[in-house]
Amino acid sequence: EAGVVQSPRYKIIEKKQPVAFWCNPISGHNTLYWYRQNLGQGPELLIRYENEEAVDDSQLPKDRFSAERLKGVDSTLKIQPAELGDSAVYLCASSRGQTTDTQYFGPGTRLTVL
Amino acid sequence: GQQLNQSPQSMFIQEGEDVSMNCTSSSIFNTWLWYKQDPGEGPVLLIALYKAGELTSNGRLTAQFGITRKDSFLNISASIPSDVGIYFCAGQGGETSGSRLTFGEGTQLTVNP
């Protein structure tokens, strides 16, 4: 069974530019998560989807961050415009459906904002 | 929000030694989880603990859910070079975080052959 797929793996942009990350969860997993992991820290949840619905986006900086999960499968996380402080690893994870189910993480996208 | 204090921040050990790391919180969680993250990869779940006082093993790994529900520890016995990585604790089902996972800052483990 394929794991969580993320692309790109690395992205370098200049500040004020837009950037987008893509995630394909494990087949059959209804719940999808986006996390941000700053250097030397643990992941922090940005948004959680159950199917197409964003059920927890309280920690998503909505002034510049947006996300969508059309058709309840793939998801895209966008930052516009990017700031220097957005440099981090953006991790996608998925789980079957219950919030207590194991979350399987993708390899992440390492973003560097110059 | 809830904060997890994980210690030590880093450990340098010789192959074959046992390792212990722990995690404490100022408030309770209903579930404690331990993850390992290799460079360039996402975290992988090692052990999940669902009940206060629970002691669970997974091969050379043993973890315990503290009685107060505010702490957990992870032990690795007879370490080997592939144990190298960053170990994260995570709490779930907290008083303020609900179902959201709250991660510690990680313990960087280095194993010298």
Image (cartoon, coloured by chain):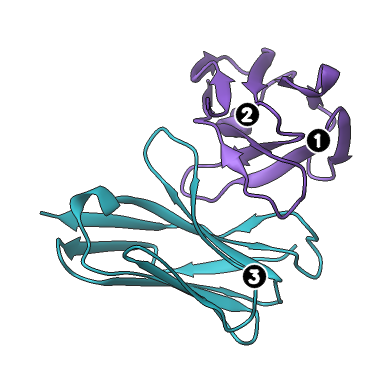
- In the image, is A14 to the left or to the right of A40? right
**Reading the chain from its start, which is encountered first: label 2 or label 1?**
2
Q: Disc 2 vs disc 1: which is toward the camera?
A: 2
Determine the secondary structure under disc 1. strand
Determine the secondary structure under disc 3. loop
Residue A81, percent from left and from top: 73, 18
The residue singled out by tag 1 in the image is: A49
Q: Which label number is shown at residue B50?
A: 3
Q: What amino acid type should be assigned to the residue bearing mark 1?
A: Tyr
- In the image, is A43 to the left or to the right of A70? left
Disc 2 chain ID? A
Q: Is residue A24 above or below residue B23?
A: above
Residue B111, percent from left and from top: 20, 56
Determine the secondary structure under disc 2. loop
Q: CA distance from mark 2 to mark 1?
A: 14 Å
Q: Which label number is shown at residue A26?
A: 2
Q: Which chain is cyan?
A: B
- In the image, is B94 to the left or to the right of A56? left
| Residue found at the very far left of the displayed protein | B113
Q: Residue at x 80, y 61 (%)?
A: B98
| Residue found at the very far bottom of the displayed protein | B67
Q: Is residue B92 above or below residue A114?
A: below
